[in-house]
Every structure is written in C-alpha cells, then in structure tokens.
Image (spheres, rainbow, N blue to C red):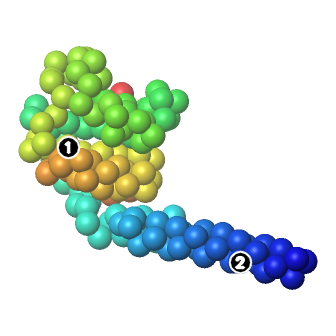
Amino acid sequence: MNQKNSFSKLMAALLVVFVFTSCQATGQQNRNLKVYESSEQMLAAAKEVITEITVEDFKNTYTQADIFIIDVRTAGEHKSGAIPGAVNIPRGVLEFKIDMPGIWENTGKNPPQKDDRIFVYCSTGGRGALSAKALMQLGYENVQSLQGGFGAWNAAYPNIRE
C-alpha cells in the first residue's frame, strides 16, 4: 500500500505541475501583449508609431482654436508652468478622462472627437509619447506629441507660458 500511495502522490504532483505549466503557456499564447525588456524599449516602440512635433512647428499651431492641448504631467508640474491653453490630464488617468466634458469646460470646448487635432506633452517627451500612443489605441486619429516636452518649450519660449 505504501508504494501505491507514493505512486498516487507522484502522479498527483505531476498532474498539478502539468496543469500549472499548461495554464501559464496558454495564458502567454492567448494574450496579445508585447513585453518589453525596459521602459526605454517601450518608449522607443511608442515613438515608432506616433508623430512627434518640434517646438517650432508646435508654436506655429498651438493658438489655433481647433486643436486640443493636453498636459499629461502631474497637477503639481502643471501648476509650476504650462503651455497656454493646455488642459491638465495626468498620464495615469488620461484614457479615463479624455472624453469627460467637465475636463474641457474651461476651454469652452466639448471633448475631442476621434478626428480632432490633439497635442500632448509632458516634461521631457516620454510620457507624452506613451500618451499619444494610448490615445491612438483609443481611436484618436490626429495625435501628436511635443518633442522634448515642456522642457524644450520652456527653453525655446520661456515667456510664453501660463
């Protein structure tokens, strides 16, 4: 009986290992998730699919009434200075708040439509690039990220800020 009991325990253990590894493998195969080695690699992948705009090109368009400017920095960063007309929607909540009317009420605009021109920026460009990609994944078709972020804007135009 001791041999039979040991054999049963061994078979049960092998079954558990098989099921566990099968579930893991199946989970990996069923997910269509790109895994990156680092945040730098993730950022590089985002920059392959988004459009970045230079500070100079952005300055020529930022005052147009038909564009949406989103500052994806934290509220504290935004309060320390921002591009005029920018609405602060921090990166961590962007996908959830982009279409909320209350966010846009101070601009006199309704939330952006999928084909509206949207510019996003952060401090140096990384969060802006990831934000642009996220908005594109939500179906926004005309999104651009400010190359170099607010740091580049402030260096080029220190007197043009809120």
Residue density around tag 2, few if under 14, some if 14–19, many if 20 or more, within 10 Å: few
Q: Which mark is residue 67?
A: none
Q: Is residue 101 left or right of residue 122?
A: left
Q: At which x and y percent is residue 133?
A: 30, 56
- Residue at figure coordinates x 45%, y 40% from the top left: 92
Check disc 2 and give the amino acid type: Met
Q: Nearer the viewer, residue 48 or 28?
A: 28
Q: Is residue 15 above or below residue 103?
A: below
Instruction: Count residues near mark 1 (Cα–Cα under 10 Å), then give few for <14, some for 14-19, many for 20+.
Output: many
Q: Residue at x 43, y 56 (%)?
A: 126
Residue 11, relative to residue 40: is it above or below?
below
Across and down, in percent, residue 47 comes to 32, 66
Q: Nearer the viewer, residue 75 or 93?
A: 93
Gap between marks 2 and 1 measured at Cα: 59 Å
- Name the residue rendered at 18%, 28% in the picture: 111
Identify the residue shown where x is 26% and y is 25%: 100
Question: Residue 113 appears at what percent x and percent y?
Answer: 12, 36
Q: Which residue is mark 1?
A: 118
Q: Nearer the viewer, mark 2 or mark 1?
A: 2
Q: Residue furthest right?
A: 2
- Disc 2 is placed on an element classified as helix
Q: In the rendering, which numbered label is found on residue 11?
A: 2
Residue 156 is left or right of residue 64, and the answer is right
As helix, strand or loop, the secondary structure at mark 1 comes to strand
- Location of residue 19 by image quarter: bottom right
